[in-house]
Image (tube, helix red, strand yellow):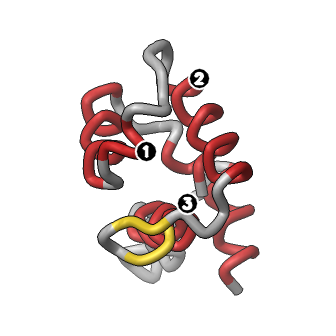
Amino acid sequence: AADVLENLTQAEISALLTDFGPSVYENIGGGSAKARMVELKQFIDRNPRHPVDDGLLENALVERAAARLPAVKPVYEWSKPTVEKPEFQRLRYGLE
């Protein structure tokens, strides 16, 4: 899920971390989007049952990432199927 969210902008990642609360936001440093998401993964590994407003942090992260998954079916019957990014495929398979 964190890999899917690495594609967010810095502002979107800041908003995401802020939504998770100060106990999460204050533990994640600055740097690139990838570096911040790596720190978030490490935080979740150290605190797997960390509570946030949406429930558990790890579940909230998966829900946010799943909401960003593109539709699998093409818009029109004659459209070529879209090729998903590997991180989207891994999340979709994990959710199935």
According to the picture, the residue beneath numbered tag 2 turns out to be 35
In this orientation, which residue lies closer to the viewer: 28 or 65? 28
According to the picture, the residue beneath numbered tag 3 turns out to be 82
Q: Is residue 83 left or right of residue 94?
A: left
Place of residue 56 in the rendered image (x, y in percent of width and height, measured from the top left): 50, 72
Q: Does the CB distance between marks 3 and 2 fall below 8 Å? A: no
Q: Residues within 10 Å of mark 1 (few under 14, many from 20)?
A: some
Circle number at residue 24: 1
Q: Residue furthest top?
A: 31
- CA separation, marks 1 and 3? 35 Å
Q: Amino acid at mark 2?
A: Ala
Q: Amino acid at mark 1?
A: Val
In this view, the mark in front (1 or 3)? 1
Q: Quadrant of residue 54?
A: bottom left
Q: Specify the quadrant that holds the N terminus.
A: bottom right
Circle number at residue 16: none
Residue 81: in sight, yes or no? no
Q: Amino acid at mark 3?
A: Thr
Q: Is residue 4 left or right of residue 48?
A: left
In this orientation, which residue lies closer to the viewer: 34 or 68? 34
